[in-house]
Amino acid sequence: MAGPTPVQIFHEEEKKRQYRSGTFFLKVGLLLLFLLVPVLFPAFKTIDLAMQIVLFAVLVASFDILLGYTGILSFGHGMFFGIGAYCVAFLIGKYGMPSYTNLALGFLIAAIVSAALALLISFLTLRVKTIFFAMITLAIAELAIILATKLTGFTGGEDGISLNTPGIFAVSFNMGDFMGLEITGRVFTYYFILFSCIALFLIMLRFTRSPLGRVLQAIRDNVQRAEALGYNTFLYQSISITFGCIMAALIGGLYAMWVGYVNPESSLGVLTIMLDVLLMVIIGGMGTLYGGIIGAAFLKITQTFLPDLQHLAMDLFPHAQLLHNVLERWLLLFGILFILVVIFFPKGVIGSVNEYLLQRKMAKPTISPSSFTPTPPGNRP
Amino acid sequence: MAESILRRWNQELTIAGAIVLLLLPLIGIQPKTYLTLTIAGIAMGMLLFLVASGVSIIFGLMDVLNFAHGALFAWGAYVGFTVFKYLMKWVVADSVLQNLAVFFIAIVAAMVAVALLGVVLERVIVRRVYGNHLFQILITFGATIVLVELIRVFWGPNDETMTVPLTFAGNWDIMDVIVYRYRVICIVIGAMVYAVLQLILKKTKLGTIVRAGVEDRDMVQAMGHNIYLLFTGVFAVGAGLAALGGLAMSIFSLQVYPDMGGTYLLFAFIVVIIGGLGSVTGSLVGALIVGLTYNYVAYLVPWAAAGVNILIMIIILLIRPTGLFAAGK
């Protein structure tokens, strides 16, 4: 038996180091926190906040596959999210009984519909220019909202659809107390969605670290070179877009399960969902996947506590009318924040931290090849 | 044989085909209604042209896709609305001269104010992200949010009613065909803007430099022209056109509201994709196609109006991915 090769030794060491690093403990801690939320803070408001953060963090990660790993901006991501939400709502709310089969079927249909639509859009636009993707997805997303609003018979129009989740996920389900925690359908739904989201996130992580993901990053950084190396960029970009959109649809279905209600405004809206997702991905950092967690946590927590902040500011300065007007328009503040982050921190929180860590590592002699930081799109030629 | 005929008569065949398509709705519509709808369609097309041409020139020269164009459009409408509000006496006066005067003051005020806004936008925000499409879209999208929210801060979040200057209100009845006066004015404005743009682009030195910039930016710079000054100027002109479009459209639809830019920006995108990014003539043709089909379809099958333009866009993308009149690059 020959001894391990130097590369193998290096990988072994790398693996060991992985479980000792600060980020590993951070991830475990984060996971524990979300696992314990229903036990520690049983109030509906906190559970809802935690669930929204989880759902949006994974949605942002799926958007990041398009934006950060493929270099394609889609304004239709909210639409795919909505398609997923509507598919699940149709199957267990409007056109079927709430049963586990129907629920699974809803997710399956959501994946198929979104995959077909994503393939169609990428086929239409990628032949021309990748920026066409942004324009056309915006147009089609608006069309989807109009259709969802106008086709009242099919989609329930502005009123949307209320749905009941089946079996142990039902709101009425109650198993009684367990260690002080009331085991209700809500709790089951929370854990179901949490574990589904973690699974989806791991799948996406695997996707970006697969050979396919590396090719995508190569295409993002330099299309010509990737083409010259013999990669069919069109095919790879289509795969990535389709993958990201299927993920978005699945998350949309989970969202519908949690909220128990879908309507055009909250599920499809370009300005409601897309804006949040864009802000989250920019704040967290493009091309990092984990950035979504930070972005989602920041934005959702701010949105939850913003009204209190407004009241505080208004009590402090009761006479500044313009300030009141500005504060009432919290979107304005987010818009300014968005521009500032794009200009000054194009890598977002995670990207900037990664850069800082890399610089510190550079100072030390031990540098590992796997401490890879994706080139932020801002520095690309 | 057939192929050579096709090639020789290419232009004539295209025009003939266009005329046939234009007359096609006559199957389902009364001729008089058809004429009214056609005028409405051309008027709408001309207004869309004002918005789309700005998007198109800015992209053609600067390679910047300006998502903030819709917000500039709304700003134009609101500046005009403010002028109308302060000169309401002239707006409702039964005098052609005063009506025209207030209309022109509103147009000039809106165009100048928004062109200045465009200069600020270009200098402060867009300049930082030249050459990076992704960041251009992101940052101009951010600018849209800020500009629209600023409208809400300054003018309030509600819809406001726009007053039509008295002379422009109402309609003429020409042999039983109802022609709204304001639509004719829209057509005149659109045609004038097209003519002026073509004259500047084709006949002046500045226009030559801009067109050369669309073809090869580096070469123009090497010839000693300050391309960045040109960029700022073109951005300002595009913003001014958006403002003119916004003001004209707000009088057309009798209202202003903060989100109005979004809807028309989408129309503008569809227009430039159909017409070809970077071409002024393409924008005009694309805008007319969109305006006419929208009006015909809205009359025949109301529920399909929103989708038909996207359908046309998809068909054009399938047969001519670069649009009908692809420019330079």
Image (spheres, coloured by chain):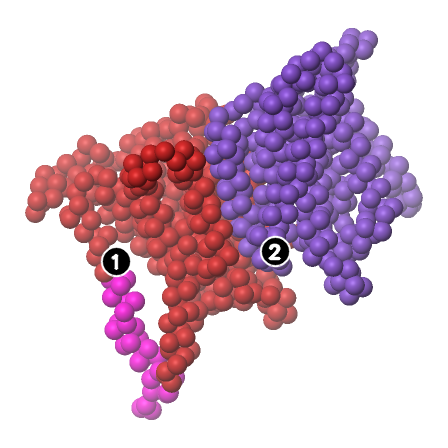
Chain colours: A red, B purple
State the image quarter where residue B77 is shown: top right
Residue displayed at 18% across by 35% down: A173
Residue A16 colored magenta? yes
Q: Residue at x 35, y 79 (%)?
A: A11
Residue A30, label in figure: 1
Q: Position of residue A207 (x, y in %)?
A: 42, 61
Q: Going 70% across and 33% down the picture, which residue do you hit?
A: B108
The x, y position of residue A222, in whole percent, is 59, 66
Q: Which residues are magenta?
A: A1-28
Q: Is residue A104 magenta?
A: no
Q: Is residue B39 above or below residue B135?
A: above
Q: Are marks 1 and 2 on the same chain?
A: no
Chain ID of residue with mark 1? A
Horizontal side of A78 relative to B16 (left or right) equals: left
Quadrant where the C terminus of chain A lies? bottom right
Callout 1, which amino acid? Leu
Camera-side residue: A105 or A251? A251
Q: Residues within 10 Å of mark 2 (few under 14, many from 20)?
A: some
Q: Mark 2: which amino acid?
A: Arg
Prevailing secondary structure class for the magenta stretch in the rendered image:
helix
Residue A238 in sight here: no
Which residue in the protein does label 2 denote? B127
Q: Is residue B253 above or below residue A236?
A: above
Query: Which of B205 and B307 lies nearest the eye of the viewer?
Result: B205
Return the residue nearer the eye: B46 or B235.
B235
On screen, residue A357 above or below B26: below
For the point 54% across and 28% down, which residue is it?
A: B257
